[in-house]
Image (cartoon, coloured by chain):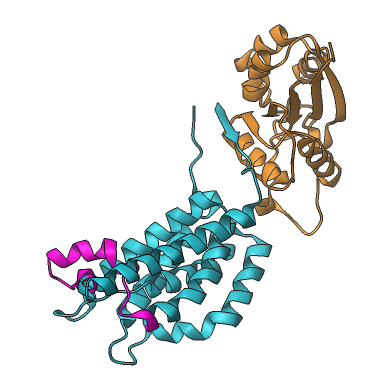
Chain colours: A cyan, B orange
Amino acid sequence: MVRLTYAKERGAGWARAAAFSVGFVALLWVIEFVDVLLGNRLDDEGVRPRDEDGLLGILFAPLLHAGWGHLIANSLPLLVLGFLVFLSGIGRALAATAVIWVVGGLGTWLIAPEHTVHIGASVIVFGWLTYLMLRGIFARSESQIALGVVVLVLYGGALWGVLPGQPGISWQGHLFGAIGGGLAAWWLAPDRQRHAYV
Amino acid sequence: MSRVVLVPGTLALLPEYAGIEDPVAALRATCLEAVGWLGAEVSVLADEQGARVAAHLLASTPRTGDEPSYLVVGNGSACRTEKAPGYLDERATGFDADLARALTAPDPAALAAIDPETSAELLAATDGIRSLGDVLTPDHVATVDYDDDPYGVQYWVVRWTARLP
């Protein structure tokens, strides 16, 4: 016997989605401002591969940026993709982001060269990108597949960033962020979630 | 004033079992209309299969309003004809007739007292329907939107709402 309650989210979903994506980007700007005041000292707190202390960087890395240019480059995709991700429910969006965050950080920590530091929210950008492109397929939702195709057309070119390219850009972070997004799309598809039995 | 809806838990209502032609088109339309009548927040009473059907119907309906709402998933016997999933069982017609009377009266005590063993023998999904006993009062008024047994399985779509005092 199953008893469960479906609570419809109240208020306009898009307003809340906008608040969360703008809020996240605003947080990044505040952190970068603090980082600049501290003489970029925070930038060492990113993922340092195979360094045990660098493991903690998995938590901080997506919040840190190497200067305003780096942050500006990430801001617009974070706003657009974040809005789309949060639009389908805050709880699910946060869960997906957590998967991307951890898989992206851990993967980078495992395979990137030692004595490097990896920071930046592009892990999240790549994760949200693959999440949006793939979740419709796992959820068997026509509207989400259509959205995934639109995202692919608009941002698909960025996916080349998962391959080694420009020095100084963490393609490892991009790659594992993208893998994290794919895993999140698979794990969080509605059919796979267990019902709560009361 | 609470709103209560009963729909059958047939897998044919799920998109993953869809075919080119919808074998339950009329039932589906009726279910969607009834579920759409519920408020935004809905409590589901069902067995596991029914919970899947409920999740799909709820996701497919835009709903507003804050009436306390219940979606119950269950159906009568699947042994009503020789071609039914459970073949013909002569008790099926009587069992379903009793059930229909208790649903439409409504008679909460009779619903709560449905025998799970007989239900299982007749392939009737009554887990959710038995718990209707906790939800309905004799003051509720039933509206039967669908009452048919295509494929030898008794399906109902019923809406209940409490009489205005």
Q: Is residue B163 magenta?
A: no
Quadrant of the snapshot with the C terminus of chain B: top right
Residue B114 showing in the rendered view: no
Residue A180 placement, left or right of A130: left
Tell which residue pokes out farthest to the front in this image. A37
The overriding secondary structure of the stretch rendered in magenta is helix
At x 21%, y 77%, the residue is A117
Q: Position of residue A47 (x, y in %)?
A: 23, 70
Residue A88 placement, left or right of A163: right
Of A14 and A126, nearer the camera is A14
Of A196 and A62, nearer the camera is A62
Q: Position of residue A96 (x, y in %)?
A: 44, 58
At x 32%, y 80%, the residue is A67
Q: Position of residue B96 (x, y in %)?
A: 78, 19
At x 64%, y 14%, the residue is B134
Of A135 and A52, nearer the camera is A52
Quadrant of the snapshot with the N terminus of chain B: top right
Residue A5 placement, left or right of B141: left
Highlighted magenta segment, given as a residue range: A42-69
Residue B146 placement, left or right of A118: right
Q: Position of residue A160 (x, y in %)?
A: 44, 86
